[in-house]
Image (spheres, helix red, strand yellow):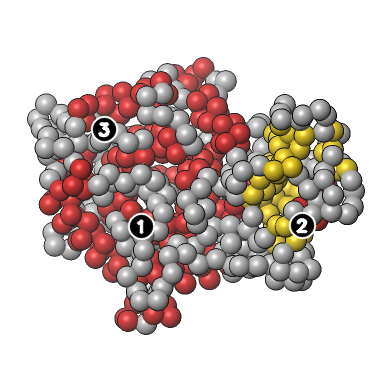
């Protein structure tokens, strides 16, 4: 992998799976058969298992192999079943959860993609990303990077990839019950931002292009096009939407006839092909038929399987390489088995292991944070609310009170009526209930009900306050 390509992955914190295409559902016209894909999956999983540290780890300092969790989930392997030397106490899920929960993670100068990476891979590993530990809520950590000065962007707006991966993580990481945990209005703001950054050629790049004619006219990147189109689809945009069909046409225009590879910025390579295929997978577009079956009878999946060592199972980055690359192996496997960029964890094979792990309550005296949106029908405010609970649960009143002084970014809550007690909230931020309209609350995407200060809030709840009829 080139150093430039590796640096971009550090910024992005790479992908995983959203929508799987069943192996047996591939049409007869597909050139990589279900049997070939099944063999690729078996060998690829075996190789990724070999990357596990003796202590059970995949993640570490710097650019590490934690994206393996997204590929494992796409391939149907539960992270809790990935165990070094038969020592179940060191299973990959437990070790990764401890890694994310550590006070020093992700370092002294974190960026939004650190938390987005954590959400995608925790979710894929079967760790509820909002409930990693009593003090770690990755959804709330990400909410802190909302840009009040540029609504729809996450983190530094010039680093557009942070916004794409916000959609991939917040839209892709459902609740344990499979529900969308963040409000659609929030996703829609960033969907509009992704649309505004689509280049004239139909693709995207890693940096902001909105409002810059020269940037919009510049050539797009294969990798980022795959990620951006997936971010739209996982956020509710249909595959028939013009933004998605334009991205599809861009990828088609870059397909190399004799190999099925995409002509990427760094030449034909496994990582770029993997990202592009994962984007197609996430949008339910079969990468082996129609527009992606070349005149020579090759597809992007053909190219990926040709990059895999047999029987070792690892994938090489470039066709000329003689050894496998961990990153190429993660990207290649995820794409071949039908993954997008975040997959729900499969049921574990380990007897007694649960599909999910999560903290179940606040720890009194331990500072934590919660994700909060406030939508008055005209403007949307997004923030992470920090507070120190005094019991295993708290109330909505306590959360909005804390938000008035400890929200990041600031301004989520400027005033609330009543200011105490447990009654119905009659006004927020100067907007009062009127007639048949008023403030409603929803937790983790559940049906909205009249907002009350006394509503019970549990650890990791994602809270939405919305003014509606």
The count of marks equals 3
Mark nearest the camera among 1 and 2 is 2
For residue 211, the mark is none
- The part of the image, by quadrant, that contains residue 466 is top right
Residue 30 vs residue 199: left or right?
A: left
Please provide percent x and percent y for residue 180.
52, 45
Q: What x and y, as percent, mark residue 148?
A: 70, 35
Image coordinates of residue 288 in percent, x first then y, are 20, 36
**Label 1 residue SS:** helix
Q: Residues within 10 Å of mark 2 (few under 14, many from 20)?
A: some
Q: Which residue is the site of mark 1?
A: 73
Is residue 102 among the parts visible in the rendering?
Answer: yes
- The residue carrying mark 3 is 263
Label 3: element kind: loop
Question: Residue sitting at 41 percent across and 54 percent down?
Answer: 344
Q: Nearer the viewer, residue 465 or 290?
A: 465
């Amino acid at each position: 992998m080139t150093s430039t390509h590796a640096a971009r992955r550090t910024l992005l914190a790479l992908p995983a799976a959203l929508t799987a295409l069943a192996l047996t559902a591939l049409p007869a016209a597909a050139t990589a058969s279900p049997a070939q894909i099944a063999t690729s999956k078996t060998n690829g999983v075996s190789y990724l298992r070999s990357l596990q540290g003796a202590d059970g780890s995949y993640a570490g300092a710097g650019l590490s192999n934690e994206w393996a969790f997204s590929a494992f989930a796409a391939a149907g392997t539960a992270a809790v079943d990935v165990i070094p030397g038969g020592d179940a106490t060191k299973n990959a899920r437990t070790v990764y959860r401890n890694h994310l929960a550590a006070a020093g993670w992700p370092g002294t100068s974190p960026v939004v993609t650190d938390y987005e990476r954590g959400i995608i891979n925790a979710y894929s590993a079967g760790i509820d990303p909002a409930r990693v530990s009593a003090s770690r809520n990755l959804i709330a950590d990400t909410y802190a990077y909302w840009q009040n000065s540029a609504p729809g962007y996450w983190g530094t707006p010039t680093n557009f990839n942070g916004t794409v991966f916000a959609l991939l993580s917040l839209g892709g990481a459902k609740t344990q019950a499979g529900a969308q945990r963040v409000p659609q209005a929030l996703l829609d703001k960033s969907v509009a931002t992704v649309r505004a950054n689509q280049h004239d050629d139909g693709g995207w790049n890693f940096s902001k292009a909105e409002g810059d004619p020269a940037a919009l006219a510049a050539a797009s990147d294969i990798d980022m096009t795959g990620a951006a189109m997936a971010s739209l689809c996982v956020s509710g945009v249909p595959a028939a939407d013009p933004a998605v069909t334009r991205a599809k046409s861009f990828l088609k225009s870059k397909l190399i006839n004799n190999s099925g590879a995409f002509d990427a910025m760094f030449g034909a390579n496994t990582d770029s092909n993997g990202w592009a295929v994962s984007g197609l997978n996430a949008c339910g577009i079969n990468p082996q038929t129609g527009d992606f079956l070349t005149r020579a009878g090759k597809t992007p999946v053909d190219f990926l399987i040709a990059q895999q060592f047999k029987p070792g199972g690892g994938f090489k980055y470039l066709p000329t390489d003689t050894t496998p690359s961990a990153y190429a192996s993660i990207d290649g496997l995820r794409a071949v088995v039908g993954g997008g960029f975040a997959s729900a964890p499969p049921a574990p094979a380990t007897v007694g292991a649960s599909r999910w792990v999560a903290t179940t309550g606040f720890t009194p005296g331990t500072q934590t944070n919660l994700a909060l949106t406030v939508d008055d029908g005209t403007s949307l405010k997004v923030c992470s609310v920090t507070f120190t609970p005094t019991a295993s649960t708290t109330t909505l009143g306590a959360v909005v009170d804390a938000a008035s002084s400890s929200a990041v970014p600031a301004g989520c809550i400027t005033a609330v009526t009543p200011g105490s007690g447990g009654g119905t909230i009659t006004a927020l931020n100067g907007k009062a209930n009127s007639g048949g309209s008023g403030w409603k609350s929803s937790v983790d995407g559940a049906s909205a009900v009249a907002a009350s200060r006394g509503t019970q809030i549990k650890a990791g709840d994602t809270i939405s306050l919305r003014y509606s009829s």
